[in-house]
Image (spheres, helix red, strand yellow):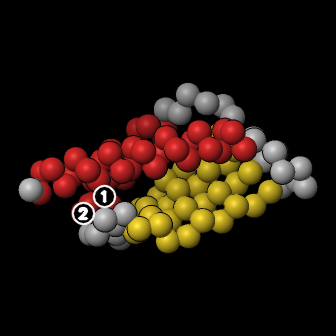
């Protein structure tokens, strides 16, 4: 199960379409599951094709922390959708192996 713990958006400027920072914390069932998903997702984050958004991922026990710094709202949305989709896909693959 993936559980979103927190989401924190902040803007560096008053313009709502510029410089958006987001922090997500995702709680997974086990530390091992978090480790596997972290290892599967890290290459995607390191080889991000977009220069408009920078992403970091960290793991603490059974939680993943994702930090996205985007130049605009559409870059943030695209990055967020991609990373969450990769995490959910990894989790679904893990569930197949368990069954």
Q: Is residue 34 left or right of residue 56?
A: left
Q: Describe the element under mark 1 as helix, strand or loop.
A: helix
Residue ID for mark 1: 35
Residue positioned most to the left: 99
Q: Residue at x 49, y 41 (%)?
A: 82
Circles 1, 2 touching at the beta carbon (< 8 Å): yes
The circle drawn on residue 32 is 2
Mark 1: few, some, or many residues within 10 Å (few <14, many ≥20)? some
- Residue at the extreme right: 14
Q: Can residue 39 be seen in the rendering of this structure?
A: no
The answer for how far apart the CA atoms under marks 1 and 2 are is 5 Å
Q: Position of residue 80 (x, y in %)?
A: 55, 47
Q: Residue at x 66, y 31 (%)?
A: 51
Q: Percent x, y for residue 65?
A: 49, 61
The residue closer to the viewer here, 21 or 84, is 84
List x then y, in percent, for residue 30.
26, 69
């Amino acid at each position: 199960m993936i559980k979103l713990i927190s989401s924190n958006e902040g803007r560096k400027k008053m313009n709502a379409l510029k410089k958006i920072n987001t922090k997500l914390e995702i709680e997974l069932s086990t530390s091992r599951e978090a480790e596997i998903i972290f290892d599967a997702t890290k290459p995607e984050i390191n080889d991000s094709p977009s220069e408009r958004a920078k992403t970091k991922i960290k793991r603490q026990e059974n939680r993943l922390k994702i930090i996205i710094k985007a130049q605009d709202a559409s870059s943030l949305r695209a990055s967020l959708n991609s990373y969450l989709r990769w995490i959910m896909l990894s989790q679904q693959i893990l569930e197949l192996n368990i069954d």
